[in-house]
Amino acid sequence: MKKAILYLENGMTFEALSFGASGTKVGEMIFNTSLTGYQEILTDPSYAGQFIVFCMPEIGIVGVNDDDIESLSNTPHTSAIIIRNYNDFYSNFRAKESLGQYLKKHNVIGISNINTRLLTKTLRECGALNAVISDEIFDIDKLKSILEQSPKINEIDYIANISSKKSKIHNKSIFEFSNFTYGEPNFKKKIIAIDFGIKQNILNELSSVGLECEVIGHNFDADNLIKRFNNKEIGGVFLSNGPGDPKILKKEIKEISKLIKAKIPMLGICLGHQLLGLACGYETYKLPFGHHGANHPVKNMQTKQIEITSQNHIYSLPESIEEIATITHKNLFDGTIEGLKYKDSPIISMQHHPEASPGPREASKVFKDFFDMVANTN
């Protein structure tokens, strides 16, 4: 493994060993607390432009397989991963290659031998930090200059490159561990799924409750969708997760506001949840270091039960949105909004990931709730 350097915008510098692609990359550094599922995490399109610091110290043990890929492009979108110990020797009957081989093939930097506990504590104290990683430049002044001249994550529209270019029908259901294959869906209603960086398992969950998903790109025409809804060709719209600052998607927000006025049943997850709030005039704000992991407790305000959830976001909606929506779920770590049911529209949204990939399945009922909403509206 080659020597590499990690330089943070606060001036901290770490020497490391590179096990992924070579080169120099800049990204926003966040930490993820998940103990399993590193393949699902690094292929989640919501991590575009970010460096993922894994709190789990041992990464690579189960290799990489062909099934646990979350992006529709079947490629990772994170810029780099940062870990404590890398295991090049993998042992799993589904594995096809090592994590290092996979990262090299897809031009993702991976560095190890880093004190990830110190990095995580630093991010908790300072918030998400911009950083640069290189295994070819070792001059700190040059790395500092590269970092200072690079655009910030909230200045970049990642969606244009990640979103689907052509529409398609999703034809898989949830993964069956009894036979290690994806199930066959039984469609009862059709919806449009707008791809801002959608995860495959969200589509699988929608399919599993009977919703046929026609996946379309971010550059959609709301008037066309309203026409199809009125003609009973579709019964609702799903707004997906995705990377970056939601406020950069000004055109998409205007189109979503048209769908809201048309009273089309909608479900938004993560970025989709934020875009719905923005379309109603409630501005998102950035959390210090966000929520990234598969072990976050959320209180269901309707049932009073605690759901352990999978999360990946750094933006949140303000409490003032209670003027137009009922808060259905709250984060027990910091009290931020995790779920909404709009008062005068057939719309529900979740800030966390109820499809839980990776993570627990306690929050997946929202997909059945959305199906019921679609079935009862149209």
Image (spheres, grey):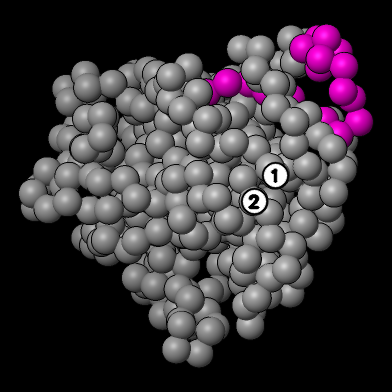
Q: Position of residue 178 (x, y in %)?
A: 44, 89
- In the picture of the structure, the residue carrying the numbered disc 2 is 85
Seen from the viewer's position, the closer of residues 304 and 222 is 304
Seen from the viewer's position, the closer of residues 84 and 326 is 84
Rendered position, 288 above or below 302: above
Q: Within 10 Å of the Cα at label 2, are there few (<14), some (14-19), or many (20+) other Cα atoms?
A: some
Q: Tell me how far mark 1 sits from mark 2, CA to CA.
A: 6 Å
Element marked by disc 1: strand
Q: Position of residue 212 (x, y in %)?
A: 46, 67
Element marked by disc 2: strand
Amino acid under label 2? Asn
Mark 1 touches mark 2? (CB < 8 Å):
yes
Rendered position, 69 above or below 264: below
Query: Is residue 342 visible to us here?
Result: no
Residue 280 among magenta residues: no
Q: Within 10 Å of the Cα at label 1, are there few (<14), some (14-19), or many (20+) other Cα atoms?
A: many
Residues in magenta, as a range? 128-145
